Amino acid sequence: MTPSSEALITEGRRVLRIEAASVAALEHRIDEEFVRACRIVADAMGRIVVCGVGKSGHIGRKIAATLTSTGTSATFLHAVEALHGDLGIVGRDDVAILISKSGEGSELERLTGYLARLGVSVIAITGRPESTLASDATVVLDCSVAEEACPMDLAPTSSTTATLALGDALAMVVLQLKGFQEDDFAALHPGGTLGTKLSVRVADVMIADEYPSLGESETMKDSIAPLAEMRGTVPVVDGDRRIIGVLTAGDLTRLMERDPDFLEHPIGEIMTREAKTARPEELGSAAAHRMEAHGIMALPVEDDDGRLVGIVHLHDLMRAGVV
């Protein structure tokens, strides 16, 4: 039986009412722990690295974007990909914000262990303050909700809304702690960052000078040194230096985990074919968007004939101000 319009209106209002109540409940949790988290973020010497999985990851991307647009350099790092080659983005001066409703999971436990060894402060945003993540964190922000707006109490709805609101509260307080003003906001938008995004080309920031490559008939043993030297991404080319694929540190890590004889595999068996690439003349912001959309850290750069002329890293684009 098709629900009536009145029933649909009632359901829509119910969802909004529950989500509004979930956000309102956070007000009483803004305490000294919250202040501590804000001060850690404001005082960070490096970037803010926001991590999450699934819906928490989507919210994390928004929190990172809000921080960046208000004067705090931030980036999103998928918690699973972090354990498969992407942890190199995290430095000792960074601060990590880890988002998880349950606060449990082997990925989070391994990630917090690595961050602790690195000496990185961890801010946990979780729905379970008694969770493993919370116990391992420097600061814990309680983002629990009484119920999800989902009629089956399953799909993340109220919890993601509350997390996003708490992230906004954090960003806005940090903005004030850092003395961020209207002039600063203007400088980071049309007159500043946006202008940079519209002027910086891939050729301006890419690493050229005969960037090293691999052949698909070489073995994974041959890839170890280039991957370590070139920040975890090496293009695979044919005899004419045309790009036919790409090999990453994540590929190597995943192979090591499942095969003890990983060194003997031909690179052609492991590499990603039809690799995403960039052109020297394209905007750096477009290349950065493509990397973020596909969860990759670098793009081989090819000329009009498809030959390798260099590589552009997300880190370098960030330093250039296009992200």
Image (cartoon, rainbow, N blue to C red):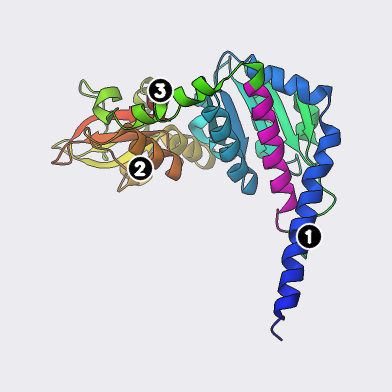
- The quadrant holding residue 229 is top left
Mark 2–mark 1 Cα distance, whole angstroms, equals: 41 Å
- Magenta stretch: includes residue 282: no
Q: Which-is-in-front pick, marks 2 and 1?
A: 1
Q: Are marks 2 and 3 in contact (CB under 8 Å)?
A: no
The three-letter amino acid code for the residue at tag 3 is Ala
- The percent coordinates of residue 77 (x first, y second) are 55, 34
263 horizontally vs 157: left or right: left
93 horizontally vs 156: left or right: left
Q: Which-is-in-front pick, marks 1 and 3?
A: 1
51 horizontally vs 284: left or right: right
- Magenta stretch: includes residue 165: yes
Q: Which residue is mark 2?
A: 271
Q: Which residue is mark 1?
A: 153
Q: Which residue is mark 3?
A: 228
The three-letter amino acid code for the residue at tag 2 is Met
Q: In the rendered structure, which segment of residues is drawn in magenta?
A: 155-175
**Badge 1 local density, few (<14 within 10 Å), some, or many (20+)?**
few
